[in-house]
Amino acid sequence: MKIPLFDIDYTLVKRHPNNKINVMEHVVRKTYELNDPIKKINYAGVGMIDPQIIYEMAVFNGVSKKIASEKLTLALDYLHKHFIAVYDKFVLVELEGGREILERLKKMKIPLGLLTGNIEPVAWKKLEKVNLHHFFNFGAFGNMAMKRSHLVPIALESLRKKHGNHYAMEQLVIIGDSLKDIECAKETRIKVIAVATGKHSKKELQEAGADLAIDSLKEKTQILKFLS
């Protein structure tokens, strides 16, 4: 059986339409002492990891690459603190099918991991918000690398620490919604199930090279067959 590595945003959860809190813009503004308003970059649902988003947004707003890089650790620390501060008002919606497939895989005793651009404490708090955190006990997170594909060997190491050294890289399967998830899988030579619950259509995900493209995680039969 293959081991799934789940993305979080637009794969398992998404923002509630009434959630107007923009954590990243606030973090960039405060960390790099920028005046309101700051110029936005398009990062929602594109699969960038948190350090990339912060760095690129800072540079896009006139911060030198040197300063953007030097203050990145500070920015990630502030991201955690600010997310905790707005946590009660940060409303997320659980995407259809996610809980059901997780429950099915857990009953089958399949290790369930995360591979997400979110920094680790934010990732767990998001999943806790919708009570999905208890399904997972290993993974790789945005604060652990500067590129998504670099998270895959970290996820494998985490899997081995929790479940045994017999697991191999080729057993891993990314489950995510973005083209970056597909790119990440190709770069690390593992498989990817792409879910059309984010910015990209099923057709776009297929054309980008997804090993399996589905409309949503409700398609349990296809997912289970692919992982078997």
Image (tube, helix red, strand yellow):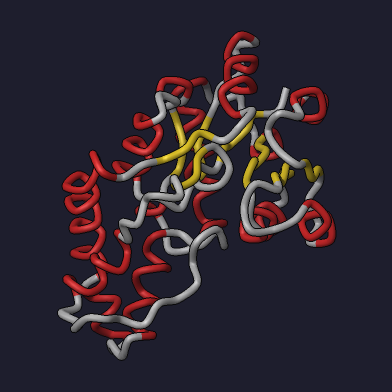
Residue in the image at 52% along x and 21% along y = 164
Q: Is residue 89 left or right of residue 41?
A: left
Q: Residue at x 29, y 59 (%)?
A: 23
Residue ID at (32%, 79%): 58
Answer left or right for 130 relative to 33: right
Residue 150 located left or right of residue 220: left
Position of residue 151 relative to residue 165, above or below, is below
Q: Nearer the viewer, residue 204 or 189?
A: 204
- The quadrant of the picture occupied by the N terminus is top right
Q: Is residue 207 above or below residue 219?
A: below
Q: In the rendered image, which quarter contains the C terminus? A: top right
Percent coordinates x, y for residue 84 in the rendering: 20, 44
**Relative to the observer, which residue lies in front, 66 or 106?**
106
Residue at screen point 36% across, 42% down: 91
Compare residues 70 and 222 and report the one nearer the observer.
222
Residue 6, by quadrant, is top right
